[in-house]
Amino acid sequence: MVQQGFWRKARRTLGRVPFTEEAVAAFYCATDSATPMAIRATLLGALAYFVLPIDAIPDLFLGLGFTDDAAVLLAAFTAARTHITEAHRGRARIWLLKQKAA
């Protein structure tokens, strides 16, 4: 579910939410086989919440719609901060640059 919906959601939110780069880096970390399983599960759970169209505050509400997503992702980013490497962040930056150029 996360892998199927993540890239579509990341493209849609590009420039609309300040945490897109962190979410992409978290996705790369969550799909990295070197990441411990507990961290992968935490990140995938948070990313699933981000991807799902139904959550505590629907994303349609401008200004408020992504606050619940941000809170869930921030908690996951905090738990995984030592596992989200510069390589994951670099891949995220490259992906963002490609999206902006397209």
Image: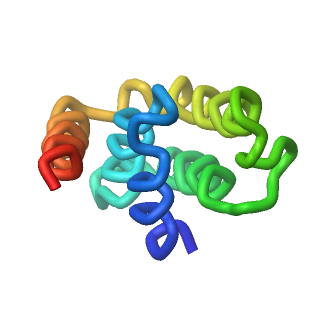
Quarter of the N terminus within the rendering? bottom right
Residue 102 shown left or right of residue 84 in the figure: left
Q: Tell how many labels.
A: 0
Residue 44 shown left or right of residue 62 in the figure: left
Residue 98: image location, x then y, percent = 14, 50
Give the answer, above or below, for where 86 lies relative to 88. above
Q: Which of 90/9 is in front?
A: 9
Residue 52: image location, x then y, percent = 68, 62
Q: Residue at x 33, y 41 (%)?
A: 25
The picture quadrant where one finds residue 69 is top right
Q: Which of 90/37 is in front?
A: 90
Give the answer, above or below, for where 13 lies relative to 4. above
The residue positioned farthest toward the right in the image shown:
56
Residue 10 shown left or right of residue 93 in the figure: right
Query: How did the renderer colour the structure?
Result: rainbow
Q: Which of 98/74 is in front?
A: 98
Give the answer, above or below, for where 94 lies relative to 30. above
Q: Residue at x 16, y 56 (%)?
A: 102
Residue 93: image location, x then y, percent = 19, 37
Q: Residue at x 19, y 30 (%)?
A: 86
Q: Residue at x 28, y 53 (%)?
A: 34
